[in-house]
């Protein structure tokens, strides 16, 4: 299957370090899989107030290559792709190295993450 970059013709917007929550921590029951379309929420936001954002992850290997289809490690690094281009300015104003967030299934937090690096997002001017 094609990577998000191959399908969209775009580079990743930013890079995160992630850790999926265990069942005991309130996380998912099954293992995470590549190309599952989890949404993203900033730490400190509430799903019912600020909402969640359509930013999808693609788990990568130690060398930075997208992992193949199937189960992915419970912790690792991932390229993040902002799906709603109209919100790029909103995210550019909020995303920076060190910012923390969550991967979401609806209003449920299933993983924590921390931004490590801005990628394509740093190449775009902020817009409203």
Image (cartoon, grey):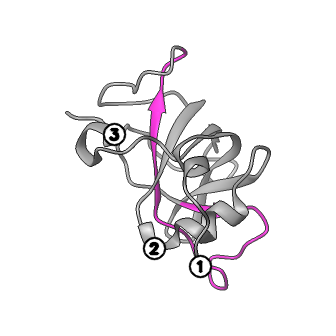
Quadrant for the N terminus, please. Answer: top left
Q: Which residues are magenta?
A: 40-62
Question: Left or right: where does residue 32 sit relative to residue 16?
Answer: left
Q: Residue under circle 2?
A: 86
Q: Residue under circle 3?
A: 5
- The residue nearer to you, when weighing 19 against 87, is 87
Q: How far is mark 3 from mark 2, CA to CA?
A: 19 Å
Question: Left or right: where does residue 6 sit relative to residue 54?
Answer: left
Disc 1 + disc 3, Cβ < 8 Å: no
Q: How far is mark 1 from mark 3, CA to CA?
A: 25 Å
Image x and y of residue 121, in percent: 56, 51
Q: Which residue shows up at 64% across the image and 45% down it?
A: 21
Is residue 45 in the magenta section?
Answer: yes
Q: Is residue 46 above or below residue 85?
A: below
Q: Quadrant of residue 15?
A: top right
Q: Residue under circle 1?
A: 128
The residue positioned farthest toward the top in the image shown: 63
């Amino acid at each position: 299957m094609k990577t998000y970059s191959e399908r969209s013709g775009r580079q990743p917007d930013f890079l995160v370090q992630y850790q999926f929550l265990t069942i005991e921590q309130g996380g998912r029951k099954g293992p995470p899989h590549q190309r599952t379309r989890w949404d993203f929420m900033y730490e400190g936001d509430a799903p019912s107030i600020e909402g969640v954002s359509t930013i999808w992850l693609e788990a990568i290997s130690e060398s930075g290559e997208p992992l193949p289809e199937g189960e992915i490690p419970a912790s690792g690094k991932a390229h993040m792709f902002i799906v709603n281009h109209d919100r790029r300015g909103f995210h550019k104003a909020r995303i920076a190295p060190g910012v923390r967030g969550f991967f979401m299934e609806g209003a449920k937090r299933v993983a924590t993450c921390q931004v490590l690096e801005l990628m394509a997002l740093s190449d775009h001017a902020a817009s409203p």
